[in-house]
Amino acid sequence: MIRLNRIYTRAGDAGNTRLVGGQKVLKDDARIEAFGTVDELSACLGLVRCALGAPGAPAEAAAIDAILRRVQNELFNLGSDLATLPEDRHPARPVVEARHVARLEQEMDAWNESIPELRSFVLPGGGFVATYLHLARTVCRRAERRLVTLAAHEPAADQNLPYLNRLSDALFVMSRHASRIYREPEPLWEPENT
């Protein structure tokens, strides 16, 4: 059972925090950077979900929202795993698994069937939902980089890195899908205009 009755503890005032196992680390520790960026990514997805729920959203927006709700829960599992040293992980703790990566791939494949083939790079923009998805994609890529930094020094769970890698791809394809269902333009890179 989780109880969060008191949010502030003053324990972090000196620049330290504690991992799930109770170990004190600096707030800029690679592990904290990794799961903090995963938390930031989840907040970006919350922003996307708010935009999806705006009045006048197409009916297909509900399907994207359901996927992002699931992804936010998966990201919480991933962040919880990152906040715990391997020796302190409880065997029943939910973690990201290969099935989560495969599900993202299946969803991308389905979206790709309904969007036009790309002949240039896509620039973030066109509409709020697509742009917020691009923002989430860039934060996801940073979370992936933070995890690579952590994994260079400490063991990492097998599926965390593939999941973030696939999720960033999925957010890109989802942004294109959102542009289609919202009937908004997809800004493309035009190198000759530089």
Image (cartoon, grey):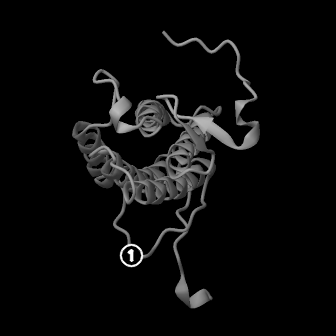
Q: Front-most of 163 and 88?
A: 88
User: Compared with residue 70, is residue 138 higher up or lower down, i.e. above or below?
Assistant: below
Q: Nearer the viewer, residue 84 or 191?
A: 84
Along the viewing direction, whichever of 133 and 71 lies nearer the viewer? 71
Q: Which of the 4 quarters of the picture holds residue 45?
A: top right
Residue linked to disc 1:
119
Residue 136 x %, y %: 54, 50
Q: Is residue 166 above or below residue 25?
A: below
> At which x and y percent is residue 59?
48, 32
What quarter of the picture does the C terminus occupy?
A: bottom right
In this picture, is 117 found above or below 114? below
For the point 52% across and 72% down, the residue is 188
Residue at 37% across, 55% down: 151
Q: Where residue 125 sits: x, y (%)?
A: 60, 61
Q: Name the amino acid type tagged 1.
A: Arg
Crowding near the residue tagged with mark 1, few <14, some 14–19, many ≥20 C-alpha atoms within 10 Å: few
Side of 159 relative to 120 (left or right): left
Asked whether 43 or 184 is in front, the reply is 43
Provide residue 183's location: percent of width, then percent of height: 52, 51
* Above or below, 156 relative to 97: below
170 relative position to 124: left or right: left
Secondary structure category for the residue under label 1: loop
Q: Residue at x 58, y 47 (%)?
A: 129
The residue at the point 46 percent across, 60 percent down is 145
Q: Number of labelled discs? A: 1
In the visual, does 22 lie left or right of 99?
right
